[in-house]
Image (cartoon, rainbow, N blue to C red):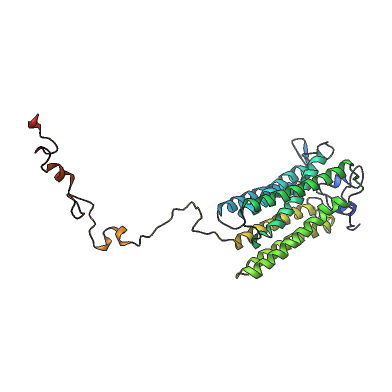
């Protein structure tokens, strides 16, 4: 069965998505082929290879966040770092949901799946807004820019979370058989945000940058994102059968999505340059003295700091002042023979 608008039946029969145990029927939709599980200390761990990629993704995201935060004066630093924080949280939550650490039969699973759905939708919203930061419609890093981003992501998260949990629990006119709204925010919304982001960045590069190398990062990122969708929704069962259930399309989807996120970082890093005049780095600056007055003895002029009387015209030293008459003929300091 292929992909049908508003229906997860065909998608979930091919790919083991987080929401698949909660939609389609009261028992969910089981994939045709999925990665085998492993027994770790009496606990079954599903999708072990995918969980390994989740761990790698969290580590790589932490490294990218550190590098972004070190570029103190780069354009859009605070905005883009929010996207990577959200991606790290999504990967952490996906690791627990994919592996079965939070069992699908547990009463908390629908709530965690709804949170996951809301985070994914808001992360794409964050990426979409970051695509317009470079156009400087609002100055980056200002409260207006940051709060607009935060409120927008929060609004998307709230709407997506409500639609997801209402679909899973069957209230407010939603149920697990009426999944059109959930399909839009889970499948269609990420595609729309990605297309707009890619187009906006191509316009930004061609209109404002002399360097065309960032286009390569955009192309690679788009390619990894496209490959991820194709491998998950078209060839997951084929991969699973060919490799004897050791891995499935979800493994390659997670890996390619990590690579596409890394290309987002690489692209942002390639189009931003620090203003070194105002940057704060860990390396000590080397200052070259140009003023001959501050250069020391290299100028051939002796600027002695010793002042026996006074170097100012008409000045007298303290010793001369107190040795003058007019103070009862007494000098300073007083001699011992006077006492």
| Point 73% across, 51% down: residue | 152
- The percent coordinates of residue 284 (x first, y second) are 44, 53
Instruction: Judge whether 46 appears above or below 304 on screen.
Output: above
- The percent coordinates of residue 94 (x first, y second) are 75, 46
Quarter of the image holding residue 128? Answer: bottom right
Viewer-closest of 19 and 143: 143
Instruction: Judge whether 10 appears above or below 339 on screen.
Output: below
Q: Quadrant of the C terminus?
A: top left
Viewer-closest of 292 and 50: 292
Instruction: Judge whether 3 appears above or below 150 on screen.
Output: below
Q: Is residue 194 visible?
A: yes
Quarter of the image holding residue 127? Answer: bottom right
Q: Quadrant of the N terminus?
A: bottom right
Q: Is residue 37 visible?
A: no
Viewer-closest of 121 and 249: 121
| Point 70% across, 56% down: residue | 129
- The percent coordinates of residue 36 (x first, y second) are 81, 46
- The percent coordinates of residue 92 (x first, y second) are 71, 44
């Amino acid at each position: 069965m292929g992909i049908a608008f508003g229906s997860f039946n065909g998608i979930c029969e091919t790919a083991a998505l987080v929401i698949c145990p909660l939609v389609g029927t009261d028992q969910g939709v089981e994939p045709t082929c999925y990665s085998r599980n492993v027994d770790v200390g009496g606990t079954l761990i599903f999708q072990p290879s995918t969980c390994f990629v989740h761990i790698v993704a969290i580590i790589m995201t932490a490294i990218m966040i550190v590098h972004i935060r070190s570029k103190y004066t780069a354009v859009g630093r605070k905005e883009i770092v929010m996207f990577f924080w959200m991606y790290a949280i999504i990967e952490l939550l996906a690791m627990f949901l994919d592996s079965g650490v939070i069992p699908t039969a547990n009463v908390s699973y629908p709530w965690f799946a709804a949170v996951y759905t809301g985070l994914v939708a808001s992360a794409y919203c964050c990426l979409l807004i970051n695509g317009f930061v470079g156009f400087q419609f609002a100055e980056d890093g200002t409260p207006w820019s940051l709060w607009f981003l935060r409120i927008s992501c929060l609004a998307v998260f709230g709407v997506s979370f409500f639609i997801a949990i209402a679909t899973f629990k069957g209230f407010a006119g939603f149920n697990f058989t009426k999944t059109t709204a959930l399909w839009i925010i889970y499948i269609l919304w990420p595609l729309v945000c990605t297309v707009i982001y890619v187009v906006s960045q191509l316009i930004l590069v061609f209109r404002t940058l002399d360097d065309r190398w960032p286009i390569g990062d955009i192309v690679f990122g788009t390619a990894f994102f496209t490959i991820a969708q194709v491998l998950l929704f078209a060839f997951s069962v084929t991969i699973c059968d060919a490799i004897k259930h050791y891995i499935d399309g979800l493994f390659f989807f997670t890996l390619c999505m990590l690579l596409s996120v890394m290309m987002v970082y690489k692209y942002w890093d390639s189009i931003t340059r620090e203003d070194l005049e105002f940057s704060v780095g860990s390396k000590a600056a080397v200052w070259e003295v140009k003023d001959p007055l501050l250069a020391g003895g290299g100028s051939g002029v002796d600027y002695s700091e010793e002042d026996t009387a006074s170097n100012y015209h008409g000045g007298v030293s303290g010793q001369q002042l107190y040795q003058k008459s007019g103070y009862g003929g007494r000098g300073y300091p007083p001699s011992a023979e006077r006492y």
